[in-house]
Amino acid sequence: MNPLYESRTETLISPNNQNPTIRTARFLKPIARNLDNVSEIPKTPFVSDIFSVQNLQKWPLMVFFTGWNPPQKNWVGWFNRLVIHHATTWIKAGIYDGILASLHEIPCNKGLVFGVSEFWCSKTNTFIFPWGEATITLEDVMILGGFPVIGGSINKPIEENDDKFVIELKRVRTELSEENLKNNGRNEVTHLAWLDHFMDEEEEGEIENKEGEFEHVAFLSLWLSRFVFPDLNEGIIDDFVFPIATHLSKGTPIEIAQSVLANLYHELTLLTQNVIAPPLDCKHYTCGLFKIVQLWVCERFPEFGAKLAKTLEIGDPRVVKWENVNFEYSLSLVRSRLKVGENFQWRPYASYLKKWEQIQWPFYDELDQIVSDYADLDDPLLSFCRFLYTCELNGHEMKYKEMYQPHRVAMQFGYDQDLPGQFIVPAFDCDKVGFYIPSRSFCSRISVSYYNWWKNYMLYHEEVVNDYFWPKRGKCISESSVERQLMLETNASSDRDNVPLALRVRQGSRKPIEIKTKGCRVKSDSVGIDRMPLDLRRVSNVEENVAYDSLDIDHMPLALRHETNGLKKARLKPPDRYYSTENVGKSQTEGFVVLLSDSNSHFSVQESSVGKTSTDPERDVKDSISRLSSKKLLASLARIEKDLAVLKTRVIYD
C-alpha cells in the first residue's frame, strides 16, 4: 500500500496564535525534505502587489463572464417534466446536485471575483495571500457545483449502439442552425432555440420514444453547454457535449469536476494576464465557471456572507445558501479583508449546517478513520481520495492541462501542512493507496519548518516587489535598517559629502538646516540632482527649504540653490536653462549671475573668470541685442522673464 500521506511526531504551530504543540502529524505527499526540494512560488509580483502600489481602485479591464448563465424561463419546466423519470439515473451518474444547482440564480459581484483573482498564481494554481496559500479544489467543485469527481474520462468514446443519439442530435442541430441562418444570418444554435425546439415538440407529441431517451440526452446536452462547459460564443450548443450527455443519460459517471476545475484554473490565469497587459479594446471574455469562485469566497470568508446566507432545506444543494443574494462590497473592501486570514474557514463544509445532508458525505464524520480496505469502498470515500491526489487536470477537448496540487493546501482537507514538494504525476490506482479522513472538528496546524519558510518567503517577496517598482533604490526590504545605520555613522563624522544623497534628505522637516560654507549660507532642495537617479529626485514629504551642507557647491547648478518668493509650499522645478557659478574667485566682483548660452538662446553675456573681466558689460549686451530681430528679441526676453519669475538668486554673505 502506498499512502497519500506521511505520519510522524512533529512540533506544530497554529497559523493564528503560533502556540507550539507536539503530536502526531499527518502531511499530504509530496513533502520536501529540505529547502532545496521545496516547490517554490515564483519570485515575481502578483496582480495584488501591482495594483496596491499603483493604488488602483478599479480594474483597467472590462470583463464579460460568458460562463455565468442564469436559468432560462422554461428550464425549470423542462426539469420538472424529466426529473420524475430520470432522477435515479442522475443520482447514479453523480450529477443530480449539479442539475438542481442550475435551477438557482447566483447574482454576480465582480468585487468579490476581482479581489480574490488578484492573488492568483498561475505557476502553482493557488491564491497567494499574505497569510498563506489556498485554492479551489475538487472538493469545492463537487460541493458547490454538484459535479462528480469519479468516473470515466470526459473523452470516453460511446458504444456503437448509442451512436444513434449523437447522430440524431447533430441532425437537429444542423436543421436549427440552417433555420437561424435564414432568419438571423447566423449559422449557429442558441440555448434558447434548443430549449424551445424540444419543448414545442413535446407539446405537439412529436417525441415518439415513450421513455423519452432522446429528449433526455437533449436535456443533458443543454445542461452541459450552458452550466458546465460554456463556450466563449455565449449561448451556443456545441457538438462535443453530445457524447458526454449520452454517457450520463445511461447513468455512467464521468469526471466532470476535473475538466471544470482545469478550465477554471486556465481562465483565472488568462484573466490575470490580461488585466496586467490589457488588449487594445480593454475587454476580456471568460467562459470559466467564475460563479464557483464567488461561492468559494463566500464559504471561506464568512464575513462576506454569513449574515446573508439562506437556510437550506433537506435535499437542497449547497448553492441554495447564496441564491439571489446580492453582495454590495467594493473592491477595496474585498482586498483588505482577503489579506486577513484569521477568519478563513479551512473546512467550511465540515462545519455543522442545519438540514444539510452531510450524511451523504461520510468524510465529514465526527470520528476520524484510516482507509486501507478497498473491498467495500463506496463512491463518496473514493471521491475524498481524489481530492487528495496530486495530478494533471485535463481541460475539455484536451486543449490544455493544469496542475492540481492539494499538498500545497493540505489544511483544506483536515491535514497538517508541511513544506510542499515538487509536483509529480503518479499513476492513480485506488487499490494501492491509503488515506486518512480526519474528524470534522479536527484542528489542523503547520510545521515549524513550513512556518519559517513562509515567513522568509513573504520577506523576500516584499523585497521583490520593491525591486520591481524601484530597481534603482536597491533592496528596500533592508533599506530602513541600512539608513539608520548609515545615519548613525554619519552623525559621528564631519565628512558628510560621502554620504548617499538620498540619506541626507530629512523627510518632513519644516525647519531648514543652514550650514556655513566658505563664507556663504546655501539653501536648496537638492544636491547634485543632475547626477541623481530620476526616481530619487522626487522625494515626497520634503519641504522646499531643505538645506544641504555640501562643500563643493561650485559643481551644483545654481538654479537648484535658489528658493522662490512665491507660495511657501511651492516646489522648485528644474528650468530649461539653468544658472551656474563657475570659477568664482576673490578678484571677481561678488554676487553676480552668468546666463549660459544654449541652443535656444540668441544672445548671451560673456562668462567671467579669474583674471578676465569685461570693461563695458552693458555695451556687450547692447551689441548682442542689436543683432537680433524684434520678433526674436521679444521671444528671448519672454523666456528670460519666465526663468526669472521661477528662480531668484539668493546668495547671503557673512
Image (spheres, helix red, strand yellow):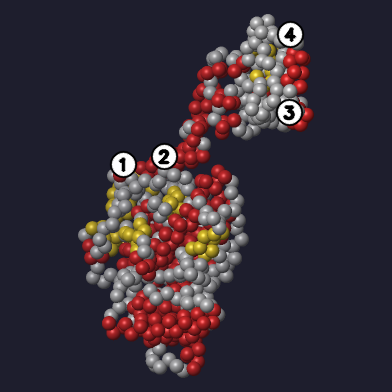
- For badge 1, the amino acid type reads Asp
| Residue under label 3 | 636
Q: Earlier in the sequence, mark 3 or mark 1?
A: 1
| Residue under label 4 | 615
For residue 104, above or below residue 328: below
Q: Earlier in the sequence, mark 3 or mark 4?
A: 4
Q: Earlier in the sequence, mark 2 or mark 1?
A: 1
For residue 97, above or below residue 594: below
Q: Tell me how far mark 4 sits from mark 1, CA to CA.
A: 78 Å
Image location of residue 171, percent across then percent down: 40, 84
Q: Tell me how far mark 3 sits from mark 1, CA to CA.
A: 68 Å
- For badge 3, the amino acid type reads Ser
Circle nearer the viewer, 3 or 1: 3
Q: Tell me how far mark 2 sits from mark 1, CA to CA.
A: 14 Å
Circle nearer the viewer, 2 or 3: 3
Circle nearer the viewer, 4 or 1: 4
Q: Is residue 315 visible?
A: no
| Residue under label 1 | 36
Badge 4 marks a residue whose secondary structure is: loop
Q: Tell me how far mark 4 sits from mark 2, CA to CA.
A: 71 Å
Q: Circle 2: is it few (<14), some (14-19), or many (20+) Cα within 10 Å?
A: few
Contact, mark 4 vs mark 2 (Cβ under 8 Å): no
Q: Earlier in the sequence, mark 2 or mark 3?
A: 2
The quadrant of the rendering that contains the N terminus is: bottom left
For the point 39% across and 51% down, which residue is it?
Answer: 123
Q: Earlier in the sequence, mark 4 or mark 2?
A: 2
| Residue under label 2 | 456
For residue 99, above or below residue 20: below
Image location of residue 412, percent across then percent down: 41, 57
| Residue 437 located left or right of residue 100 | left
